[in-house]
Image (spheres, helix red, strand yellow):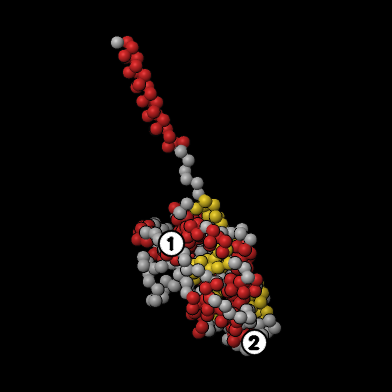
Amino acid sequence: MQDRLSRMLGRLGVLAGALIALTAAPAHAQAPTLKKVKVAMASATMSPSYPYLYVAQKQGFWKEEGLDVEVLLAQGSAQVIQLLASKQADVGMLNPEPIVVARAKQNLPIKSIATVGAIFSWSTAVPPNSPIKTVADLKGKKVGVFSLASGGAFYIKARAVEAGLDPEKDITLLPTGFGAQAAEALRSGAVDAILLWRAAFAALENAGVPLRYLPPAPWETNLYSYIVAANESAINGDPDTIAAILRGLAKASEFTAVAPKAATQIYWQAYPDSINVRIDRKLAFDNDTRSVRAQLYDMGLELDSLPKPPNRIWGGQSESNWAFLQDYLKRAGQIDQTQNAADFFTDRFTAPANAFDKPAVDKMAKEFKTEF
C-alpha cells in the first residue's frame, strides 16, 4: 500500500512539474525577431506632410509586416540615390526626375517601385506685390529651391527652357531648404521667388507668409511628384521585404486618407516638440491638418479618376507617365536621349502592397480619437 501511494505521488509530481513548465514557457518565449530595414526620405526634416511614414511607425503597420524600420532623413533626392546605390538604405522616397538622370547618365541600377505623389506638386511662388508674373520674368532673378539636387531644380530648368531662357545663365538657383528658412529668404529679398512642393507651401501659408503662384504648365498633369525607389539588387534579391515595406506605406496611406485629423494627432504624439506653442492649440492642429490634406491632394485623393478608400490601389505606375517624364527632361536639356520607360520602374509590387484588409484599416482610422 505504501509503495503504491509513493508511486502515485511520484507520478503526480511529474505531472505537476510538466504543468508548471507549460505555464512558465510563454514567459520565457522570445517575441518574433523583426527584420531591420532602412527607408531613406528626401527631406532633412520630418513634418506633417509625410503621414505614410510616421503613421506606419506609430500604428504598428510595419511591425505587423515583421519589420523594424529606421527612417533616414536625407538632404534631397540626390543623397537618397547615393544611399540606395551604396546599399545603405533598402528603399528611398524621392522625386522621380533624379532617378531618370542618374540612370541615363551614370547607369545606376535604381528603379521606382511605387508612386506616392500621383499628382505633380512643384510650384513657383513670389510675394503678392512682385513684378514677376510668369516664368519668363525670372530672367536675371534668384530662385530659392529646397536643394540643388531636388526634383524641383529639374522642373524650373525645364520651365525656363520652355520660356526661352537659358537655365544655366538666366536664373540663379539658391538652396534655401523649406519652412522658416525659405520664408525668411523670400521675405528678406535674398531670393526673388521660391520653388517648393504643395505641402511645403501649405506650411508657409500656415505661418502667415503671403504668396502668389506663377501659372503652371499644362503638361504638369502627366508627371508624378514623389516615388519610392530601390536598388535592383534588393528588388530581385529580397522582393518579400520590399513588398512588406510598401504594404506598410499603403496601410498608412489608407489610414490617412480616411482620417486626416487622426494622422495629425499621431504626428503630435510622435513629435510633440514640433507643436507650435506660440499660437492657439486648435489653430496649430488645424494648420498641421492642412499640411496633411495637402499631401493627400498630391496623392490624388481629390481626383475623380482615382477610386477612394477602400477601393483605392496605392502605388501604381504607368509606362506612359515615365515616357513623358523622359521627354520633359530631354526638352530641359537634362538628358540627351530617351530609352525604354520600363527601365525606370517596375509595377510588380503594386498587387502585394495592396494585399491587406482595407476595411479594417478604415475602421481603425474612423475610430481613432483626436483632440479636436
The residue that disc 1 covers is 352
Apparent side of residue 365 relative to residue 235 in the rendered image (left or right): left
Q: Is residue 354 above or below residue 156?
A: above
Residue at disc 1, secondary structure = helix
Residue kind at label 1, given as amino acid type: Pro
User: Which circle's residue, 1 or 2, is located before the other in the chain?
Assistant: 2
Work out which residue is located at the far top of the displayed protein and give it. Answer: 2
Residue 90 seen anywhere in this rendered image of the structure: yes
Residue kind at label 2, given as amino acid type: Leu
Q: In x, y percent, where is residue 133?
A: 57, 86
Q: In x, y percent, where is residue 37?
A: 55, 55
Work out which residue is located at the far bottom of the displayed protein and give it. Answer: 164
Residue 191 seen anywhere in this rendered image of the structure: no
**Mark 1 closeness class: few <14, some 14–19, many ≥20 residues within 10 Å:** some
The residue at 55%/60% (across/down) is 234
Q: In x, y percent, where is residue 123?
A: 55, 78
Q: Is residue 18 above or below residue 162?
A: above
**Mark 2 closeness class: few <14, some 14–19, many ≥20 residues within 10 Å:** many
